Image (cartoon, rainbow, N blue to C red):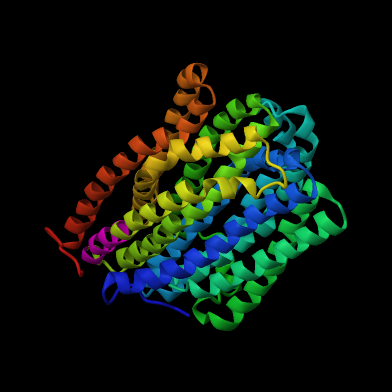
Amino acid sequence: MEVNMTTGRPYKTLVPFALNVLVGNLVLQLYNVCDSVIVGNFNDARSVAAIGVVTPINFMFIGFISGLCAGISIKLADRYGADDREGLRAHAGTAVLIALVVSLMLSVGLILFNPALLTLLRTPTSIYADSRAYLNILYGGIIVTVGFNLSIGMMRAVGDSRSPLFFYVGASLLNILLDLIFVGLFDMGVPGAAYATILAQAIGLVMQILYLRRRFSLLHFERRHLRWQPQCVKNILNQALPMGIQFSITAIGTLVVQAALNTYGPEIIAGFSAANKVQALGFQLYLSLAIAIATFVGQNRGARRPDRIRAGVRQTMWMALACSAVVMVVTLVAGRIFVGMFTTDPSDAMMGAGLTYYRVAFSMYPILALLIVYRNALQGLGFSGWAMMAGVVEMIVRVAVIVFLTDAMGYVGVCLSDPLAWIPAGIGLVIVFYRKLRQVERKAGYAHANGED
């Protein structure tokens, strides 16, 4: 179902859109948690650690894919907001070709460099084989992952956040079922979880393609659209490439953190990984609002409505701060339960590592909310390069914390790397966003737009 976000009160379109995204992302993240829970309960804490070790690597290439597809979605939203149907189809056709090329390059490159990367991260010998096998399977299925994310982005570009919800739910439930079959019934261990992920996404992608062809006539691009159109390529890459790189740059800092963490052994790795996987569920509150505001800003930029952009971002930020309070309370009260569910008998070291991370990161959740919302709003406004620079700041701070604090503070220094990186990046994004919004307002003929509340 298409939703035009260029009319009406901003929050009346933002809230339903964000709620659908939230449920879909929570289901997706719940699968990620269940993935580790199923592997850990049918095997042991080392299996949880094997998946935990590859999480930042996973974040680097999945983040690049997600950022690229999100950038494509914003560009399509811009054409939809401008009511440029031919331009929408042309950009969609070009995006498919770009996705195919990117998939091939990523698959080949990542499989070749997988051993070197795991060695660079000082992956413990006891979990190296499982980690390598898990990643190689995911790398081989990158074309499926790209296609799945691109289809979701196309639906969201035209304001439909409900259909992606159903596809996320279906793929995640199928993923969990396949985990139980491959890991529990067939005893395939960590590789079985990777096979389950790719197969579930592949089935979901086929269903998405059939659905797009049936329900979204405005996205029906013809053979003439499925070609390299220089202007479309330029428009898409200018928007999408910085977003993909931004995720990858952020992930480089996370890889440095993982390398430092790996020196503490499998139990600490498992505790840190468990805490991060559960915390990722809370992040979805912010991320759902961020995806909503990126689409909202993209459509209203195309419609030349900077007044609505200002009002929408303000309202979204208040909602994000309210979500921060919820996340803070839940992680503080139920942190022990969350960490303990990842294995049948968590050690004191694993439990302590997870709870320590929660306590260190707890007070910075409002800053994280600000960071995610304003980064996506800036990307929706068309300034992906500045959002990428914020990712560079995050990476530099993470690396600096690991280099200068871990010797003195040990594992607590590792835990500080995330919250200390959020602060300068988040504040910088707020300043840049409002400066760029004033430029857009002046270009559209607005001196000081108050917006619709």
Q: Residue furthest left?
A: 447
Residue 322 location in percent, x, y? 33, 57
Left or right: 108 as drawn, with respect to 322: right
x, y (%) of residue 368? 39, 45
Q: Quadrant of the C terminus?
A: bottom left
Does residue 176 appear in the picture of this structure? Answer: yes
Q: Is residue 369 above or below residue 95?
A: above
Q: Is residue 315 magenta?
A: yes
Q: How many marks?
A: 0
Q: Residue at x 44, y 56 (%)?
A: 287
Q: Residue at x 23, y 63 (%)?
A: 311
- Majority secondary structure in the magenta region: helix
Q: Residue furthest top?
A: 408
Q: Quadrant of residue 178?
A: bottom right
Residue 194 in sight from this viewpoint? no
Q: Nearer the viewer, residue 194 or 39?
A: 39
Give the side of residue 177 with respect to residue 381, left or right. right
Vertical placement of 11 versus 55: above or below? below
Q: Residue at x 60, y 83 (%)?
A: 214
- Name the residue nearer the viewer: 166 or 249: 166
Question: Measured along the vertical axis of the image, is residue 43 above or below residue 252?
Answer: below
Farthest right residue in view: 186
Q: On screen, 26 above or below 239?
A: below
Q: Is residue 257 magenta?
A: no
- Magenta segment, which residues? 307-317
Q: Looking at the picture, tell me which residue is in the foreground, 274 or 302.
A: 274
Residue 141 x/y as whole percent: 72, 54
Q: Position of residue 13 (x, y in %)?
A: 35, 73
